[in-house]
Amino acid sequence: MFRLFSSNMAFFAHQIQRSFSSSVVRNVVIKNVTIIGGGQMGAGIAQVAASTGHSVTLVDMTDDILKKAMKGIQSSLRRVVKKKFSDDPESGDDFIQKVMQNVSTNTNPAAAVTSSDLVVEAIVENMKIKQDLFGFLDKMAPEHTIFASNTSSLPISDMASATSRPDRCGGLHFFNPVPMMKLVEVVATSSTSPETSESLLNFTKALGKTPVCCKDTPGFIVNRLLVPYMMEALRLHERGHGSKEDIDIGMKLGAGYPMGPFELSDYVGLDTIKFITDGWREKEPDNPLFAPSDLLNKLVSEGKLGKKSLQGFYKYSK
């Protein structure tokens, strides 16, 4: 009888704990945001979060990286106020000062997450590194903290598996440049709770962005359509069925796209496209959409990565 009583009490305690945990998540209003990674994407996310009144901590490995990120945020804000406060430069200066006061920096990720409502990782696209980061921060962050990844192609569920809070993990895929691009893909895994998804959707809207809900599938929505489109344009060119210039002109004038697929590939980065398709092919080796391209592999091996290296499918000047 004592054993039965103990089992019932254990079950009852577990239910209370689950209910408490759910209520904690349900009542979360995201105010304090920690962003891991001070590169272009991380700095952009920090800027839009700070601009909408959130308290932001930007984390990276060195003070030099963080100083560069803060300088980039300030420069980006100057471009914003030049348009937004063209008739009132004094108010523009006040806006910049207020936004910058909302951003602090830290080289210690453990310390940075102790009071965070949301952690967003925007680091290198390497699953093992992301899992190690989430596993470490899981032990440091409060129970209610939501973990989100800005990955464009890696499975969120694999990152969440490194934590004890898979129900409080999801994806927030921003687009580059973050201050300009309105879309955010809000990604839910099979374990993401409805409360977590709602919190991420509300946060995205609070940033002034437009969210779309996605499942945790390769490429989510945008890249799942966009990357095969760019790869098919490349194969069309490889077969000799059209020059890259004619294909670009055709898609711009015929489909109304602002960039052709080769221009877009150079903008995205040829190494990024190769990384994404290589990863998808590992999971679905028989899918013809993910087949490799000899020309793409050759350009990447030669360091011709697109605009960032001043040469890809086209040549660029500084």
Image (cartoon, grey):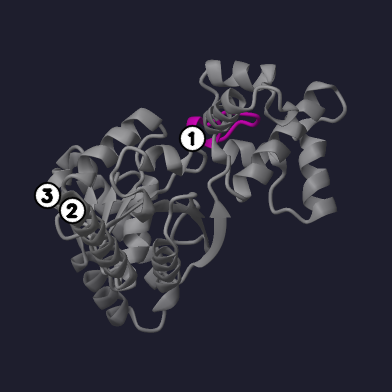
Q: Which amino acid type is shown beneath numbered disc 3?
A: Ala
Q: Could you tell which of marks 2 and 1 lies nearer the N-terminus?
A: 2
- Identify the residue position indicated by label 2 in the image: 1
Residue 11, image x, y percentages: 26, 56
Numbered disc in front, either 2 or 1: 2
Q: Is residue 183 above or below residue 312?
A: below
Numbered disc in front, either 3 or 2: 2
- Seen from the viewer's position, the closer of residues 219 and 293 is 219
Q: Give the quadrant of residue 77.
A: bottom left
- Seen from the viewer's position, the closer of residues 103 and 142 is 142
Q: In this view, does 24 lie to the left or right of 277?
A: left
Residue 177, image x, y percentages: 47, 53
Count of labels in the image: 3
Q: Which amino acid type is shown beneath numbered disc 1?
A: Lys
Which disc is residue 111 wearing?
3
- Seen from the viewer's position, the closer of residues 294 and 134 is 134
Q: Are marks 3 and 1 in contact (CB under 8 Å)?
A: no
- Look at the image and give the residue range highlighted in magenta: 306-318
Residue 84, image x, y percentages: 43, 76
3D distance between C-alphas at marks 3 and 2: 47 Å
- Identify the residue position indicated by label 1 in the image: 308
SS category of the residue bearing label 2: loop
The residue carrying pointer 2 sits among few (fewer than 14), some (14 to 19) or many (20 or more) residues within 10 Å by Cα, namely few
